[in-house]
């Protein structure tokens, strides 16, 4: 009998397991695949509370501390190099200046940098692009394809933790005092509580709730350039299009007026594109991303194809921002995540035993650890 069974081995499920273990509970983590293959490993690895609204920024800031506490004990690839938003024109400069003042009021450290200071810090920047920057020194980056495995390896050192991989839970029975979980091989498990933290298992186990929800699925396209070992891009690089997109900037007094001047027919609007960069340890650079949307009931409308025109747009815009000697694509992929159209996360409690928590959207890597702590306390009435 486990105190908690967690279904879904991505960032959200793994940190529900982590925090339950921190409380002294026994935990089983179930992952349907051999290893996580979803949004947790298909992102930039940017941990950027600076981009979020006040509620989620607070959870993101809590996550910064959680990540660093684990990194001090076990290498999970966390690096504290900060994040920078690069303004390319006067409107974007105005927005970063306004957000800087908001950060002061929130006691979240940020630094306004002149164009000259940005160019000194990031010599690969093009002078004709950068007008100013807003730097967040406390923010982190990680290798997402490595980090989740390391965190789970760290958890497996705890004797109260059991990790089941290639184990698909197909039924949850809540008729007794405890939850009875049945997997695809008809093997059963007992747990006092269940945290269901994966959209695909949510659809399988509770299709009526899944299809009645306001969730939508988002497809993102991104690529990795071949190593540029002569270039150093420390931390998270976010650009003018990101300044115009991220939630935190919606707090700025000038935001609505500036958005009203944008061309709604622009290519980047059609495909939900903003430009982010993050350099990996081998010198390769992740570039992206785009966004396409479909209601959860019609998620199959999002195909699995990679659009060459989107890749070309990434490359052409990269040329305007950075001087890179190698713009050859090493690999490319699509990521998918769920989010609420009118809610910031999906939560549903069944009989105070099964706690469905999913559709965290693009906030999982940044705010997932902090949110999981809050949710575990709620689940166990702490």
Image (cartoon, helix red, strand yellow):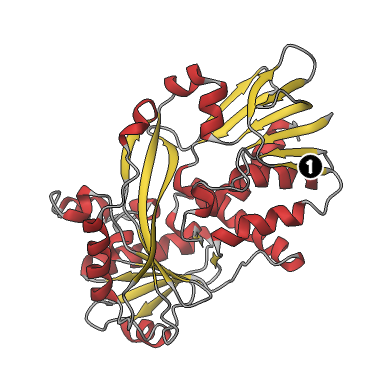
- The quarter holding residue 177 reads top right
Query: Measured from the top left, where is residue 102 in percent x and y?
Result: 42, 59
- The quarter holding residue 262 reads bottom left
Horizontal side of residue 307 vs 231, given as left or right: left
Q: What kind of element bears circle 1? A: strand
Q: Nearer the viewer, residue 374 or 199?
A: 199
Q: Nearer the viewer, residue 201 or 278?
A: 201
Say few, some or many: other residues with alpha carbon within 10 Å of mark 1 (under 14 / 14 to 19 / 20 or more). Answer: some
Residue furthest to the right? 159
Residue at (39, 32) in percent of width and height: 342
Mark count: 1
Query: Measured from the top left, where is residue 31 in percent x and y?
Result: 64, 40
Is 288 located above or below residue 55 in the figure? below
Is residue 318 visible in the rendered structure shown here? yes
- The quarter holding residue 248 reads bottom left
Horizontal side of residue 70 vs 3, given as left or right: left
Q: Which residue is mark 1?
A: 162
Residue furthest to the front? 185
Query: Measured from the top left, where is residue 32 in percent x and y?
Result: 61, 37
Quarter of the picture holding the N terminus:
top right
């Amino acid at each position: 009998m486990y105190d908690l069974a967690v279904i879904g081995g991505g960032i959200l499920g793994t940190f529900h397991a982590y925090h339950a273990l921190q409380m002294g509970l026994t935990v089983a983590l179930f992952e349907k695949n051999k290893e996580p293959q979803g949004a947790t490993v298909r992102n930039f690895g940017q941990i950027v509370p600076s981009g979020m609204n006040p509620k989620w920024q607070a959870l993101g800031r809590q996550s910064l501390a959680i990540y660093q506490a684990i990194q001090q004990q076990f290498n999970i690839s966390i690096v504290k190099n900060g994040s920078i938003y690069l303004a390319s024109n006067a409107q974007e400069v105005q927005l970063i200046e306004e957000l800087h003042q908001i950060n002061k009021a929130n006691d979240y450290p940020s630094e306004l940098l002149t164009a000259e200071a940005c160019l000194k810090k990031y010599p690969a920047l093009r002078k004709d692009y950068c007008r100013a920057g807003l730097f967040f020194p406390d923010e982190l980056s990680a290798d997402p394809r490595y980090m989740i495995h390391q965190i789970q390896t760290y958890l497996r050192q705890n004797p109260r933790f059991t990790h089941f991989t290639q184990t698909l839970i197909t039924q949850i029975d809540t008729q007794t005092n405890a939850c009875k979980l049945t997997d695809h091989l008809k093997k059963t498990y007992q747990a006092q509580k269940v945290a269901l933290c994966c959209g695909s298992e949510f659809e399988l186990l509770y299709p009526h709730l899944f299809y009645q929800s306001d969730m939508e699925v988002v497809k993102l396209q991104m690529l990795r350039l071949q190593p540029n070992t002569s270039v150093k891009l420390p931390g998270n690089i976010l650009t003018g299009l990101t300044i115009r997109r991220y939630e935190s900037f919606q707090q700025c007094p000038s935001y609505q007026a500036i958005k009203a001047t944008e061309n709604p027919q622009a290519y980047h609007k059609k495909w939900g594109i903003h430009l982010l960069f993050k350099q990996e340890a081998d010198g390769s650079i992740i570039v992206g991303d785009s966004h396409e949307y479909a209601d959860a009931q019609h998620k199959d409308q999002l195909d699995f194809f990679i659009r060459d025109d989107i890749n070309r747009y990434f490359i052409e815009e990269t040329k305007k921002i950075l001087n890179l000697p190698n713009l050859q694509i090493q690999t490319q992929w699509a990521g998918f995540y769920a989010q609420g159209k009118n809610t910031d996360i999906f939560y549903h409690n069944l009989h105070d035993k099964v706690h469905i928590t999913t559709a965290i959207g693009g906030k999982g890597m940044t705010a997932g650890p902090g949110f999981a702590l809050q949710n575990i306390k709620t689940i166990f009435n702490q």
